[in-house]
Image (cartoon, rainbow, N blue to C red):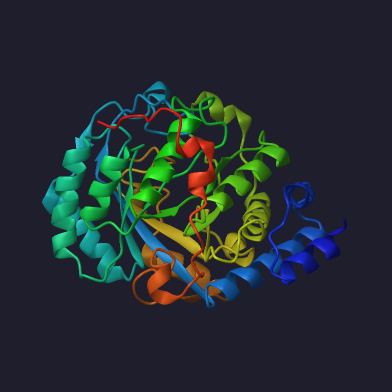
Amino acid sequence: MNIDEILKKSRNGDVLSRRELILLLDLPPDSPEAYLLMAEANRVSKDVSGGKAEVHAQFAVNLAPCGCDCLFCSFAGINNIFSEATELTAVQAVARALRFEADGANAVFMMSTARYPFERFLEIAGEVKKNLQPATTLIANVGDQTLKNSIKLKDAGFAGVYHALRLREGVDTGLSAAGRKRSIFNFKEAGLEVGTCVEPVGPEHTSEELAEMIEFTASVNPAYSGAARRISIPGTEIAGRGMISELRMAQIVAVTRLGMPRTVPGNCTHEPCTLGAIAGANLFWAEAGANPRDIHAKTEEGRGVTVAGCQALFQESNWDVLCGPSHFYNRGAHGTGQRQPDRSAADPAAKHGPVIPVG
């Protein structure tokens, strides 16, 4: 099968097979065929999202050395980047959330390290929720959770979560793939929309690994999937493996879009860049506070991009930016990506595998 046949299949609305995904991932990033692929992914992304990109904004509730020891993360205790634990007060968290709301973020994310006390996270979230406009979309980015805790997140006013099965989970991380999958199914069973991503991509990851992960993210019918490259943390062992280029990341973003059913309206990439948007990314993140890809405790002084900065990158890439609450995390309310039956119950990992406690 050649590139023209694969793109014709996409234009007919069909999801690509693993073999087809691998073929596209194997293309040289700067080949004419790769640019055709990116153009098709851009077309699909605009079609399923009504031509509207979104900017979501995340702030960190805390910063602390983390015992999960994900090799790519600046929080990992093994990487010796941060040695002291700090956390926001509820007042500070509310101020961060209100700033993002005023800046026009389509969703506000609250992130914590994996073992931050869950009840404390809920306590702060309660104050944040009370102070935001009722329509503002609030999202959690937390560690693995039981179904009971997932329901608590829903009851606290969260519309959804970000949670990913990372590449080489359990090898480059101290967590288990089964635990990550189980958490995703718990979030979905609790009624939370799940956003996810193929990440963090490094030059050592094969096309077969990437295609398998694309298929997994598609199987949970997420609010969005996408792809993000690994950002090297200076002085760490994993930094020696290098980084992929933005062009290679854009190619993977495009392939991920074509590997998703049309019920998935979002296609993310991180960090924000025009190449990603041109290749079909319709979701960027602004960030404040701690950032697992940054050695600055305040990422707004380092790698973090503002809401306005993300919006400008989309506009430079010929995207309109949504005004108002996220359509990706509120698919049913806005008709963005027709919902399909939850297929996660059919996955054996939904019923088995350890759950990694948080806190």
- Where residue 299 appears, as percent x and y from the top left, is 35, 47
Residue at (71, 68) in percent of width and height: 40
x and y, in percent, of residue 137 in the image:
30, 64
Above or below for 9 versus 243: below
Q: Viewed as shown, does residue 83 lie left or right of 316? A: left
Specify the quadrant that holds the N terminus.
bottom right
- Residue 328 shows in the view: yes
Report the quarter where the C terminus lies.
top left
Nearest the eye: 169 or 337:
337
The mark tally for this picture is: 0
**271 lies above or below 352:** below
Q: Quadrant of residue 258?
A: bottom right
Left or right placement of residue 24 versus residue 113 in this view:
right
Q: Quadrant of residue 311?
A: bottom left
Residue 317 visible in the displayed image? no
* Nearer to us in this view, 152 or 348: 348
Residue at left 62%, top 30%?
241
The residue sitting at 79% across, 68% down in the picture is: 8
Where residue 243 appears, as percent x and y from the top left, is 61, 39
Foreground pick, 52 / 6: 6
Q: Residue furthest right?
A: 1
Residue 91's place in the image compared with 177, above or below, is below
**Residue 26: where, in percent of width, then height?**
78, 46
Q: Nearer the viewer, residue 103 or 324?
A: 324
